[in-house]
Amino acid sequence: MRRIKKGDEVIVIAGKDKGKRGSVLRVLDEDRLIVENINIIKRHTKPNPQAGVQGGIVEREAAIQASNVMLFNAQTSKGDRVGIRTLEDGRKVRYFKSTKEVVDV
């Protein structure tokens, strides 16, 4: 089970965007994420009229290392570590380590 999933609210703890918050758009690998409005790069794109792509400089999100983000805990308004525990009915759920509160219901 992954500690960070698509749609989670995360906060950046290292790098040029330290302190910014955003939601996870995609999980690429076990350790790479694309986060909304985080790690913006400028990509110089050639025009492709057959595909309807206009040329120019395009700003988009690049992948960020999963170790550089923490799941955002709304109760404490901080980033929090995440653990995995098994419930009585056998389901695995994520929980915040500081408050012992379950992330997914």
Image (cartoon, rainbow, N blue to C red):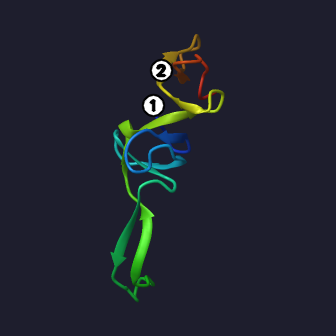
Q: Quarter of the image holding residue 53? A: bottom left
Q: Position of residue 41 (x, y in %)?
A: 38, 64
Q: Position of residue 60 (x, y in %)?
A: 44, 65
The local secondary structure at tag 2 comes to: strand
The reply to whether discs 1 and 2 touch (Cβ–Cβ < 8 Å) is yes
In the rendered image, which quarter contains the C terminus?
A: top right
Q: Position of residue 102 (x, y in %)?
A: 60, 22
Q: Quarter of the image holding residue 55? A: bottom left
- Whether residue 89 sits left or right of residue 65 in the image: it is right
Q: Which residue is mark 1?
A: 3
Q: Amino acid at mark 2?
A: Ile
Q: At 36% from the left edge and 71% from the top edge, which residue is drawn?
A: 43
Q: Which residue is mark 2?
A: 84
The local secondary structure at tag 1 comes to: loop
Q: Between residues 58 and 105, which one lies in front from this camera angle?
A: 58
Q: Position of residue 47 (x, y in %)?
A: 37, 85
In the rendered image, which quarter contains the N terminus?
A: top left
